[in-house]
Structure formats: C-alpha cells, structure tokens
Image: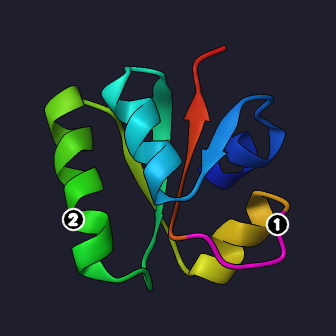
Amino acid sequence: MQLERLKAAKQKTVGLKQTLKAVEKGQAKIVFIADDAEQHVTRPLLKLCSEKAVPVEAVASMEELGKACSIEVGAATAAVLQE
C-alpha cells in the first residue's frame, strides 16, 4: 500500500499549507488526501495536483493519515517529498 511509502519517507509534509507549498514548488512525489477531510479544504490541492501531474492517493480517514505521519491528531493531507 502507498501509505507505507509515507510512513517510511525521510522527507514528508503534513497538513494542507505545507503540502500545497511542496506541490507548487515541484517537490511532492505523491500526495495523500483523507476521504473525510472537508471538500472545500482539499479541492484547491486536488486541482493543483492535477495541473502539476502529481499522483493523489485517497486515505480512508484523517485519523489514519495522522497515524501514518506519526502524529497524534488527524491530518487532512500529507505528501512524500523528492529526496
């Protein structure tokens, strides 16, 4: 599963602002978006990923994405960065 790549990644972003910045700068290899994150929050990121041809992987919940990022709160988005 792709989520394993996120857990193992040396460089990653967690959260919408950091993930948006990484995609804008061309640093993101793959972006993860939680299915239960609010659409109005994730829509701009989805659009940018589409424009920049960055693959997007859906994750079941913000809680699951947060755990994969080793944080104790939910995360709407995260990304694996180029190394």
- Residue 5 at least partly seen: yes
Q: Is residue 42 above or below residue 81?
A: below
Tell me the number on the disc at residue 23. none
Q: How packed is label 1: few (under 14 Cα within 10 Å), some, or many (20 or more)?
A: few
Q: Amino acid at mark 2?
A: Arg
Count neighbours of disc 2 (C-alpha within 10 A) and say few if under 14, some if 14 to 19, many if 20 or more: few
Q: Which residue does the image show at 49% across and 28% down from the upper left?
A: 29
Front-lying residue, 61 or 14: 14
Q: Is residue 45 left or right of residue 23?
A: left
Magenta segment: 71-75
Q: Secondary structure at mark 1?
A: loop
- Residue tagged by mark 2? 43
Q: Residue at x 42, y 80 (%)?
A: 37
**Quarter of the image where one finds residue 50:** top left
Q: Is residue 4 left or right of residue 20?
A: right
Q: Is residue 42 above or below residue 61?
A: above
In terms of secondary structure, what is the magenta stretch mainly?
loop
Left/right placement of residue 72 relative to residue 55 reads right
- Residue lying at 69% horizontally and 45% vertically, measured from the top left: 6
Residue at 36% of width from left, 39% of height from top?
Answer: 55
Look at the image and say whether residue 70 sits in the magenta stretch: no
The answer to whether residue 1 of the structure is visible from this angle is no
Q: Quadrant of residue 46?
A: bottom left
**Magenta stretch holds residue 73:** yes
Q: Earlier in the sequence, mark 2 or mark 1?
A: 2
**Is residue 64 positioned above or below 5 on the image?**
below
Residue 49, how many percent across, how many down? 27, 41
Vertical placement of residue 15 versus 66, above or below:
above
- Kindly identify the amino acid type of the residue bearing the numbered disc 1: Ile
- Drawn side of residue 12 relative to residue 44, left or right: right
